[in-house]
Amino acid sequence: MSKFLAIVSREWRAYFLSPLAYVILAAFLVMNGMIFAAIIAFLNTPGAPKGQALPFLFTNTYFWIFNLFVVPIITMRLFAEERKAGTIETLLTSPVSETTVVLGKFVGALGFFLTLWAPTLVYVWILRSQTPIDLGPVAAGYLAITMIGAYFLSIGIFASTLTKNQIVAAILGFAMLIPVFSAGLLETLSNDPGKRETFGYFNLWDHMEEFSRGVVDTRRVVYYLSATAFFLFLTTVSLTAKKESP
Amino acid sequence: MIEVEHLTKSFPGRVAVSDVTFRVEPGEIVGFLGPNGAGKTTAMRCLTGFLPPSEGTARVAGFDVVTHSMKARAHLGYLPESAALYPEMRVRDYLAYRARLEGLRGTDVGKRVDEAIASCLLEEVAGRKVENLSRGYRQRTALAGALVHQPPVLILDEPTVGLDPAQIIRIRETIRRLGSERAVLLSTHILPEVDAVCDRVLIIDRGRIVAEGTAAELRTRLAGAPVVRVALTGAVAAREALAALPGVAAVSEEVADGETRVRLECEAGADPREDVFRTAVAKGWILRELARESLSLEDVFVQLTRHEDAAPAAEGSTPLEAAGEGVPS
């Protein structure tokens, strides 16, 4: 366990030792600042329904664009950098299992992802002082962010084991996230109820709207957690296979 | 401590390590010597569990590196050839991270890190970022990382590469000190290093061990007939008198720069130097030089790793074969 925590802490801190983290953080805060301004503008509109504003924080287009682009950038270095530099050799010859390494890096990256989101709690606090806010949907929204973030990060980490080149890892990660994200959007293109239901199961956009209304559907939770576990498993397999061919 | 039996590692299309067998005991420093691409790094990677062996077994501290990989890894410290580090980390933080990965906790971490910093002479740079260090300091930081948990087995792939001569001497001292109670396997292509540090040498070439023994043993085994070199002042007809000495098989003589240089090829085990001296005294020759030629480790190495394509020779007569006699198979 202490070895796992050593990896988590090193990975989380490594982000803040590179300029990339601050660029992402700054971009993220600019984006969310704009959304927050839009929420305030909405609230200032006469006749705006009270308590309906906050879901915008989670269900806008920027949210998805940001996640699709930024998650692969967060994860690209995790294994590609170690393989390029050769530090993977000391890491994998330490008495630490591949699974521990993968989970440690995953949790470290998830920690950074959540650190990006942490400042948005201030918005909740500010809005709460001005307008009634039901905290249930807010909690559900953050839960969804954590789970969808974990899902996307697991795909990005897998992509990072496939190459030594960080940029290639980021592009691969992005290329894998696009179908995962857009499969669900096919729901809107289909008239067949069976297909609609199938695609709906993968429709992250709609899921997010449900969560931000405070609906925590266990089918969604099962989908995210099992998909995350699946990609982390693939990552471990890929890492072990890479040992065979240096 | 390190036991390797019939280890073979093949990659698609080539065999990197072929049927290698050797042991390293505690308190012993063994040098792994070979030209580039001979299979040193691959063999070491198999030992550390980074690469699975294709055939054969390897045990570290009694634990098989495949079936008891975790325990084997817990007993070894490994400095890879790349000596790769995380550039954004500070030296002390990096060593603490390595110590925690090895399972150390709490106050032990700081204590062991301090000891590693002291033994690898890193005090001056302990608080600096790795990316701002010179090559020599990085190499030493990587070495400190390999031994921070004080493992009973050390596997060091070219530990002194990139160091200046003063640093090399101090790191060799460190390795010697560590080797007094541990099993150390170090690879190098720097021959004087083997003489300076290692108790025993394994010469590996094209994936096979071609010779094994102490540096002195290898020299004697390959030196063939001993040669004694004599230089006398002036032009002296020394050939006949010297050829008559017991143990001398052949004599060649040349006169140059006002001195007579004689080369005596002797029978195996013979040492006619004292007889040469007495003869010179009796004959009134002025002796300028009297020396027995010994093969340098470079010569041994070159002879052993000379390939057929470079020096075409009949199979049975290559030095490679001659040296192979002493290799356990």
Image (tube, rainbow, N blue to C red):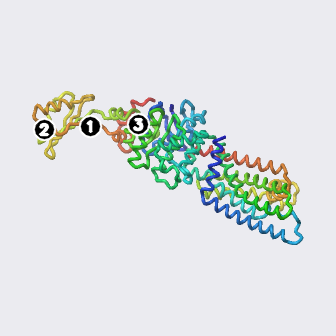
> At numbered mark 3, what does the secondary structure look like: helix, strand or loop?
loop
Can residue B15 be spotted in the picture?
no
Q: Which amino acid does label 1 sit on?
A: Glu
- Identify which residue is drawn at 73% across, 47% down: A230
> Mark 3 to mark 1: distance in Å?
23 Å
- Identify which residue is drawn at 60% across, 58% down: A18
Q: Which residue matches tag 1?
A: B293
Q: Which residue matches tag 3?
A: B198
Is residue B244 toward the left or the right of residue A48 in the image? Answer: left
Kindly report which numbered mark, 3 or 1, lies closer to the viewer in this rendering: 3
> Mark 1 to mark 2: distance in Å?
20 Å
Instruction: Point out residue B26 in the picture as x, y percentages from the top left corner.
Output: 48, 31
- Choose top left, top right, bottom left or bottom right for residue A127: bottom right
Which of marks 3 and 2 precedes in the sequence?
A: 3
Which of marks 1 and 3 precedes in the sequence?
A: 3
Q: Which amino acid does label 2 sit on?
A: Ile
Which of marks 2 and 1 precedes in the sequence?
A: 2
Is residue B164 toward the left or the right of residue B73 in the image? Answer: left
Instruction: Point out residue B153 in the picture as x, y percentages from the top left corner.
Output: 51, 35
Identify the subunit bearing mark 3: B
Kindly report which numbered mark, 1 or 2, lies closer to the viewer in this rendering: 2
Q: Which residue matches tag 2?
A: B286
Considering the image in quadrants, where does the C terminus of chain B appear? Answer: top left
Number of numbered discs on residues: 3
Determine whether A98 is above or below A40 in the image.
Answer: above
